[in-house]
Amino acid sequence: MSELVTGEAVALELRPAKLPSRALAVLIDLLVAFLVYIVVSMAVVAATASLDDAAAAAVSVALFLLVLVGIPIAVETLSHGRSLGKLACGLRVVRDDGGPIRFRHALVRGAVGVVEILMTFGVVACIASLVSARGRRVGDVFAGTLVVRERVPGGQAAVVPPPPPWLVGRFAQLDLSAVPEGLWLAVRQYLTRMGQLDPQVGWGMAERLAADLAAHTGTPAPHDVPPAAFLAAVVHERQAREARRAFGAGAVPSAAAFAPSSPPAPVHPQAPYGGQVAGVPGGSAASGSPVGPPSSAVPDSPEGSGPAGSSEPPATGFAPPA
């Protein structure tokens, strides 16, 4: 997958369209354009039958430029890069930085397309798309645009599991600017697939990814945080920062909103990160290492004591004998 980087150095996970889907979209657009051209030509010929040959030739050239060049440019401009064929194939034309195209981009693509698509029957466009790493034709190179896929099969979309609540906001001071996009991609892929991995293999992968992430942030991973939970918490922090940058600080709740009002109880090993964060590979309740915050964070209470500040015995659900 080719990554697109915006002017704010934010990598976008957009999938460049492949040659078959682009060719199908162009074919649909050309069929519709030629049908419109034939219908309009018949109407114009009937209306200009009394004109001489020179005037008829001028009308024909103007009609060709209007229907086969002007209308596609207008459609791409008004629809922000979605012609009829691209709409049917789930494609869209965007700028190199991922933004919507404007009239100048559509004009350059349409003008160059007359040569590389209409006059050469698409041979030049196919060769350029095959040579380009992102499947761009000559018109895209001159216009600074890219055709991307808008519709991605649902089976390919995976959600990164959230971190434990007691870790949300803990890494708010980390410097994430030096972490490469390739490492972020590897971390997200691991988090979405860690439930399918062998516990020992998954634990080793989490440790290596956590070490790489700590090396790029300049801050070592905490010893009291399992590596998979550390990865999930850092990814959550990055997503929260991007949301604040895109929608404003008020769009994302603060870390205090996620913090539990009381120390969290141990999590069952079958919960997310259960097999990966128990302190040893494949940890479980039987091994005495449940998932949760450090034991020092949970205050001890005297045995048999009731609620804080009360001398009453704890409620057991049984009534004492008379």
Image (spheres, grey):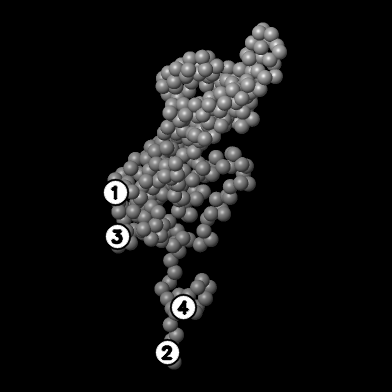
Are discs 3 and 4 less than 8 Å apart at CB? Answer: no
Which residue, given by chain and number where applicable, does mark 4 sit on? Answer: 315
Name which quarter of the figure residue 55 lies in: top right
User: Which residue is rendered at x = 48% and y = 75% of the image?
Assistant: 306
Q: Earlier in the sequence, mark 2 or mark 4?
A: 4
Tell me what residue is drawn at x 50 percent, y 41 percent.
238
Give the mark toward the camera: 1 or 3: 1
SS at mark 2 in the image = loop
User: Residue at (56%, 53%) from the top-left corner?
Assistant: 256
Task: Check residue 198 in the rendering and tell me which mark sits there, or answer none.
Answer: 1
Tag 3, which secondary structure?
helix
Q: Secondary structure at mark 1?
A: loop
The image shows a total of numbered marks equal to 4
Q: Would residue 72 be visible to someone looking at this image?
A: no
- The earlier-in-sequence mark between 1 and 3 is 1
Q: Residues within 10 Å of mark 3 (few under 14, many from 20)?
A: few
Q: CA distance from mark 2 to mark 4?
A: 14 Å
Q: Which residue is mark 3?
A: 287
Q: Amino acid at mark 2?
A: Pro
User: What distance separates the C-alpha of mark 4 from that of mark 1?
Assistant: 42 Å
Query: Between marks 1 and 3, how big is the CA–CA gap?
Result: 18 Å
The numbered mark at residue 321 is 2
Dot placed on the residue nearer the N-terminal end, 4 or 1? 1
Q: State yes or no: discs 4 and 1 in contact (Cβ < 8 Å).
A: no
Q: Residue at x 29, y 60 (%)?
A: 287
Of the 4 image quadrants, the one containing the N terminus is top left
Q: Is residue 242 left or right of residue 62?
A: left
